[in-house]
Image (spheres, rainbow, N blue to C red):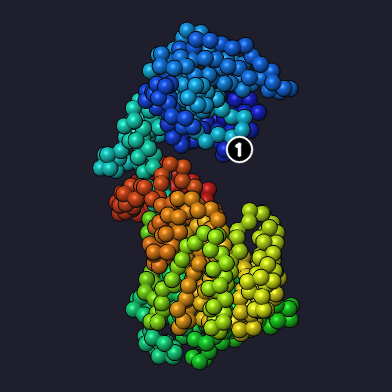
Amino acid sequence: MKITDKITALSGVAAKRAALYNKLGIENVGDLIAHYPKDYIDYSETVKIADAPVNEQSVIKGFVTQKIPAARIRQGLVIYKVIVDDGSDSLTVVLYNNRFAYEALEKDKEYRLFGRVTGGFTRKEMNTPQIIPAEETRLIRPKYSLTEGLTAQMVITNMTEALRSVSEQIEEFIPDEIRQRYELCTEEYACRNIHFPESSHAAEISRRRLGFDELLMIQCAMGMMRAGRKEAAGCPMKMKDIAEFEASLPFELTGAQRKACREIFSDMCGQTPMNRLVQGDVGSGKTAVAAAACWLAAENGCQSALMAPTEILARQHYATLKSFLEPLGINVGCLTGSMTAKQKNEIKAQLLSGEINVITGTHALISESTEFKRLGLVITDEQHRFGVNQRKLFAMKGEKPHKLVMSATPIPRTLSLIIYGDLDISIINELPKGRQPVETYAVTGKLRSRALGFVKKELDAGRQGYIVCPMIEESDGAGELQAAKAYAERIAEGELKGYSIGLLHGKMLPAEKDAVMADFKDGKIQLLVSTTVIEVGVDVPNATVIMIESSDRFGLSQLHQLRGRVGRGKYKSSCILITDNATEETRARLRIMSSLHDGFAIAEEDLKIRGGGDFFGSRQSGLPPLKIADLYNDRELLGDTSQAAKELFAASPDLSEYPKLKEKALALLNENGSEGMN
């Protein structure tokens, strides 16, 4: 048998079981070996039946004293029961539709059983436990992610055969000097002991080795992407003094903004295309930094394009860039899907002629008919909201243009090393003068009326506010729409009767959204009831209060983004987080929001709670799925792999001296798409 053979090469794996494995992404024998356990059952840690806590999982060891005849409850359901006794008490073991397991149990033989103990003081039960003979010597057993129809024992049986058959084919691809320096076990040992560990220590050193592999591969893939970007920039530029640009602004740049501008200018005047991320908290002034980059490009005879995920945000960027750049003689345009054909054609003609120096827009910027005279800088706002192909098409609009990524989603350093490992990073960690932290209060639904009273007080003072409706788990968004509509109607007839209330949701046409936002900015709408469509970028300085319903359903970083919709003007602002699910976990999460205002600190807590793979809630982040490494708990390991990757590239800039390592890194790039990993 070969490690590349289809999963059906294993005994007992016919088409039906293979289809179940395919659901888990397991196509061949190698995939099965890489299906690592999510946890282990340690059958050595037994408790007496009399001491087994009710409604908790335990391992007990006892003798089968009685086998009760099968009982057919109804068509398709047969129940088998056996009595197990360990001298302290007895336990009824219940098996459903499992004649094989029932018949395999021998009376007067001792077994170890793992499962949840139910019942009371006089009678205890364990339903569908996992069972092994008491004399079994391999007492640490794996627990796998399964799918309906695929049992743990099936996976264990197939895994045992796979490892026995192909263990000699498991290659060592990390150089010996790296393996020894970082005290790593061999690959073959790790693959065997991650599934069937000889001890708890063996399981841990195996997990460390395989986690090291996973993180090192990503670091090496990123390094290869960097090495492949040594081509000359398509639009070479000459340096300009940032003071010329700043002198035209109606405000003073912060120190962090100036530092980011210097880093960007240096990149744009280099020999190779810039590939930089500007990461800043809500309201830190990233758009002013982007405007400076557009100014430098225009001064060098090049065009700039900024792509935003929504029309609202694209138009907002248009208004902001226009105010910054047009006084300097730079023509700014906007191109969105909702424009008329005539409007689009006019804008596209001006882009092709070079009359427009800077363009903002949505996906319309990457349409086939959109052409530029000399595009030298492409800027993507909230890049993780775009698909891989969209970002690639955007960059292809120019000849090796400089690339700038803006993100208002603060990302922990550990995660940015993975997601943006091939980008240079500029962090704006300083808020403009006058920005006040938003006071945040977490309350239960019992105080909803009082919270609405607080909103009413702000509206009476001439301010405006938002209410974000609960997230509804509906694939088409219809549930959220109905919830938002019903909520707006209810408060319009109740606590907030007589106030001007607007409704904003993702099902509206772009022109409808723009009209509502325009009325809200102009003060015609006092309170905006919205779904999370307002999460990014909407800027209304007069809005001073935001109330978020069902706040327990949001990630911490998303709550921070929503909170950033207020506090953008000179008035003191507030955020009220409401939940009807006041569990201890929810209370702890919302306490974090009430006490922290730094988006980067909140992002660290969010990563701790949700893990790296779910940080954005979308594979569009480009983050390869991590099978065994944990980005929060393995931060030391991430540091080790970062250092190891630097050592490898220093010794061999294209990794050609490490062919097996290079092959795996290239495979990762091909699997995820080189454009998808940034």
Mark 1 neighbour class, 10 Å CA radius: few under 14, some 14 to 19, many 20 or more: few
Residue 352: image x %, image y %? 62, 80
Q: Quadrant of residue 311?
A: bottom right
Residue 40: image x %, image y %? 42, 31
Q: Residue at x 60, y 17 (%)?
A: 80
Q: Is residue 427 above or below residue 149?
A: below
Secondary structure type for disc 1:
helix
Q: Is residue 127 above or below residue 648?
A: above
450 or 510: nearer the viewer: 450
What type is the residue that disc 1 sits on? Lys
642 or 636: nearer the viewer: 636
Observer able to see residue 191: no
Q: Residue at x 33, y 35 (%)?
A: 205
Q: Which residue matches tag 1?
A: 23
302 relative to 237 in the view: left or right: right
Residue 516: image x %, image y %? 66, 77
405 relative to 501 in the view: left or right: left
